[in-house]
Amino acid sequence: MSGIKIQKIAYGGWDNCLQISNNIVDLVVTVDVGPRVIRYGFAGQENVLGEIRSEMGNKGGSEWKMYGGHRLWISPESKERTYESDNVPVQWEEIENGISTAQEQGPTKITKEMQITLAHDSPEVFINHRLTNKGIQSVELSVWAITVMKPGGKEVVPQTSIDTGLLPNRSMSLWPYTRLDDRRIELGNKFISLRQDWSIQQPLKFGISNDNGWAAYFNNNHLFVKKYAPVKNARYPDFGVSFETYTNDVMLEMETLSPLTMLGPEEHVDHLERWELYDNISVPSEDEGEIEKILKGKVPDLF
């Protein structure tokens, strides 16, 4: 018998949300807007995802809103296609161990869907993101899965350990507003660390190829791990990166991408993420030995 419970609840000012729970963790998915996962956390404990308080409970209108939580976007980023608003009710249906939720096609003619499922006896969450071309012309795009994390934490992203001899083995994409002397970022031999800092408004964003396929976020005694499967030798957007991260004074975003795909009419592309959550985990220092010890057994391919 399944230990997964799905029920309608009110949350964050929205009257219509869906809660998926297994007595260990729960997720809340908005139905009045979206598709969005607005909460993920241990049962009875705080939300580890970030919420934009000034926008919680809002709906309607043509202007795109941040809201917070986890969303599905289209890459490469553009004003017309990426920032299509998701302020209207979504379609949803119950599936095995979770729900499927979909935003009807708008001006872009791209339908966004998320299939969200929860493990029976662990905090594991699986989210399959799907983009479907409902237009009459082919379009090249990448699935872009973005998770807004609660402020005040520290992100750790792995450096590649592949030995390529005389050739380079990694690349980093930097956005125009990113400063290389920003004190929030720490470039280590094994990891890149990024802190969310309430006192710094200046945005910072970078992308990496991340052949290890994971990133971690430490905050408030919790550890959130986001996993995906980068495709070797595939073509990715933004100078060839499969993982991007952004921070400012109110949040930090963990972002994974699928390879660039040319979608014909009625064709779709999928991108799967796996989430894990750990309790009673302190935020580590910049010591890479300490970080490695905490993450050992929780992330794949750890040196």
Image (cartoon, helix red, strand yellow):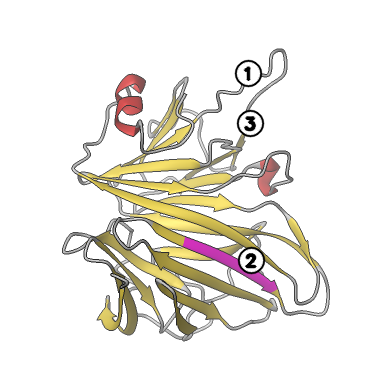
Q: Mark 3 or mark 1, which is nearer the start of the sequence?
A: 1
Q: Indicate the position of residue 102 as horizontal and vertical percent values.
A: 53, 79
Vertical position of residue 190 compared to residue 295: above or below? above
Q: Which mark is residue 245?
A: none
What residue does disc 1 label?
163
Please say whether residue 130 is one of the residues in the magenta stretch.
yes
| Magenta portion: prevailing SS class | strand
Counting other residues with Cα less than 10 Å from the Cα at mark 1, is it few (<14), some (14-19), or many (20 or more)?
Answer: few
On-image quarter of the N terminus = bottom left
Element at label 1: loop
Element at label 2: loop
Q: Which mark is residue 79?
A: 2
- Nearer the camera: disc 1 or disc 3: 1
Q: Indicate the position of residue 10 as horizontal and vertical percent values.
A: 26, 82
What residue does disc 3 label?
171
Q: Is residue 80 visible?
A: no
Vertical position of residue 53 compared to residue 88: above or below? above
Q: Residue at x 50, y 55 (%)?
A: 273
Please say whether residue 218 is one of the residues in the magenta stretch.
no
Amino acid on which disc 3 is placed: Ser
